[in-house]
Image: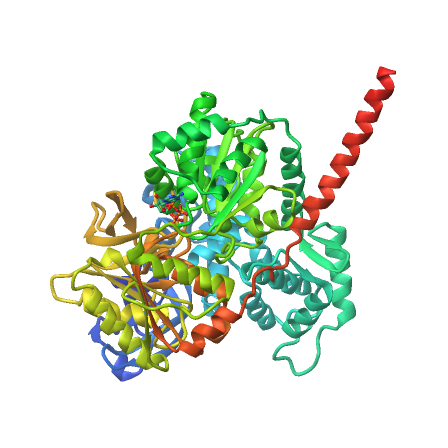
Amino acid sequence: MKCRFQSKIFQNEANGYTIAAYWTADPSIPNEARKKPAGNGFIITAVGNDLPMIKNLTYELTGYWVNNPKYGTQFEVETHMEIVKRTKEGIIGYLSSGAIRGIGEKTAQAIFDRFGLDALEIMEQHPEELLAIRGINEKKLDEIKSAYNENQCFRELMTFLAPYKITSSQVKKILLEFGSMAPEIIRQRPYKLCEIKGFGFLTVDKIAKKFNANLNDPIRIAGGISYLMKKAASEGALYLYQKSLISKALELLNAELPQQAVNERQIQRVLYQLALQRDLIVEGNRIYEYGFYEMERETAKMLVAHLLDKVPLYNVEKELEEAQQVLNIRLSEAQAKAVRMTFAHPVSIITGGPGTGKTTVLKVILYIQKQLCDDQVQLMAPTGRAARRMAESTGEENASTMHSALGLAGDDEFNEDFEYLDSNFLCVDEFSMVDMRLAYEFFRHIKRNVRILCIGDADQLPSVGPGEVFRQLIECGLIPVTVLDLVYRQAEHIRIYENAQRIKDNTGALHTGDDFQILDCSGAEETAALVQKVFRQELQDKSIDDVQVLTPYRKRGAASVNELNQVLREIVNPQDSRKRTMTVGKRKFREGDKVIQTKNRDLVSNGDMGIIRQFFLDEEGRKKAKLLFSDDREMIYSAEDMDEVELAYATTVHKSQGSEYPVVILPWIKGFYTMLKRPILYTAVTRAKEKLIIVGEQAALYQAIRTDNRGMRNTILAKRIVAEYHTATENVQETDCEQLKLAI
Ligand SMILES: Nc1ncnc2c1ncn2[C@@H]1O[C@H](COP(=O)(O)OP(=O)(O)OP(=O)(O)O)[C@@H](O)[C@H]1O
């Protein structure tokens, strides 16, 4: 359908979803779609992604008519393309539309005056002739040429990629990667799209099948393999076993095809090729992506180097006694051992559940450190929340997130240029949340002869990212570990801590009381209803910041995050006409909503919770949100930034790692089948400081306690550390012998 843009009705800046009015004289449009007559045609409404909205241009829209019960018949746009009419108005309109950088109205007019109706052919085939026009020099010509090409490519790509829900910003990414060759590349080797971040194998496969791409194409097979490796990493694995990778690849690459397109040998061949290129590393029956292999190996090497470092080793008996007196605390034997070990070894570990005195021990360590030397201790934690808690509880101001201490920009952007951390004593809390990548970066940033202390709770869930670093460091057996297992919390909340120990050790029945309640009910619906009731009750004398609903699943029925968020929000923040709203994709936020940040950024970390204070229009008329996070951090978010934010009346147990709340309400039912695991339950329970209310089925509770899946992630960091240690110490012995020989 040929049409001209008339006016914008709505556009979501975050995802490009647009509703706009267009004028058309196309006789085939259904009567009910003709909103009103205009000239010799009609106004219609079109909806779609990034619809074109330049006034002077004519567009060809393809798509289909849909009947919306509220808004009537609308055109769902699948593809759109500018049509440049070979008339004076058409050509000048196109050139001056703003689509081609470097050409404004005056230049467009001058180009037309000189080349007339051939202007576009000249631009395409003999652009150097533009130099004849006043004001266009070599530099400007280059700019125009590249902008014109880009625009041509952009139009072409939009045309054939729009049906696959590829947005204009993704098309820009393709252009950035492949330049003007992009359309050609996509037609010939569509699977090369897999090489661009954000293009999943499944989407690319759909596009490629449309172009009748060769399903045996090694790039397709490589794309499938890379997809499977990334999927495994997102589930925590650093490697896949060869047999398992091949069987998964066979399944993926032949899915929904009438007959087998890819066989095992072809996959083997591609694996071999990828291994030759060192994209993949094959080590025995394990297959790694190169990056993870390097990280695991290098981390082991760097750690061993630190283990063998010559840091000053202190006997701290005197200082330990003094610290206990000054801080007015008597440490248990295990706690005192943790202190001694920290000063007697270059690297050491303290692990223990909540309330076992990790912070207390740290305070003693920091006191002693100050007595021994002037060196400042660098305190770090993987999340902003944990870092702030560390600063608060120790009174040390310089606690920071690992990302900011290491100068890491985003979640997975790592700097090649870096500076070593300048402190001689590094102390990381919540180490169980450190994944392989962060651990690698951490050790890479540490200069030699530095003291390192890792504190955490090895029974908690492992890191969200791949690897299981903390447990592997403990398991390798070469780093001194102190386990703190005596709970020192006050009696009124003691059941939470004691029950956490019982869950951890799978011993005895759980003890209930006011601070640890188990409310029986069955099924997701009944559980969700009871969660709402309890939530309402708890809010009678507590603020919304203090009551947190945690649940293992994001999308699995009434007792999962998404559904609970909708109903809990109606209790705390019901819609009324005074509250402004913002729609981001399919989600709608309200002023007053409790939200959680889901990515690390400058001043806010993944997992930080806040409140939407206000929506407003900035000077350029764009909708913005004012968010308030803890510590009075007021942040302004654009609609795009709001993609990083979710409702947080309920959140997943995984997201809650590193956070604590006075009251936790935890639905727990058999329907959470694969999530009924001990580390998940333990992590959820230990998030509660004063009261935990479990709502659901006791059988599900005991099933989780019995199911321990720790140590199931594909990583061999511990083995590598041991192997590196043996190699390094053998060398040490040899050099020592050499020295002896020299001395004779
Ligand atoms: N040896 C001890 N004697 C008496 N009280 C202690 C001892 N060790 C710790 N405590 C007290 O127990 C409580 C919990 O200790 P602390 O905060 O150090 O534990 P934690 O392991 O850091 O807990 P969390 O991980 O929950 O922050 C504190 O009130 C602390 O003062």
The x, y position of residue 399, in whole percent, is 39, 36
Residue 54, visible in the rendered structure: no
Query: Residue at point 23% right, 47% down?
Result: 620
Who is closer to the viewer here, 423 or 634?
423
Residue 211, visible in the rendered structure: yes
Who is closer to the viewer here, 51 or 44?
51
Q: Quadrant of residue 42?
A: bottom left
**Horizontal arrangement in the rendering, residue 312 relative to residue 542 (left or right):** right
Query: Residue at point 66% right, 83% down?
Result: 258
Quadrant for ligand 1 reads top left
The x, y position of residue 52, in whole percent, is 35, 60
Who is closer to the viewer here, 174 or 77?
174
Query: Residue at point 52% right, 34% down?
Result: 340
Farthest-out residue, top: 743
Residue 432 versus residue 554 in the image, above or below: above
The x, y position of residue 470, in whole percent, is 55, 49
Quadrant of the snapshot with the C terminus: top right
Q: Quadrant of residue 539?
A: bottom left
Q: Quadrant of residue 728?
A: top right
**Horizontal arrangement in the rendering, residue 542 relative to residue 642 (left or right):** left
Residue 165 versus residue 464 in the image, above or below: below
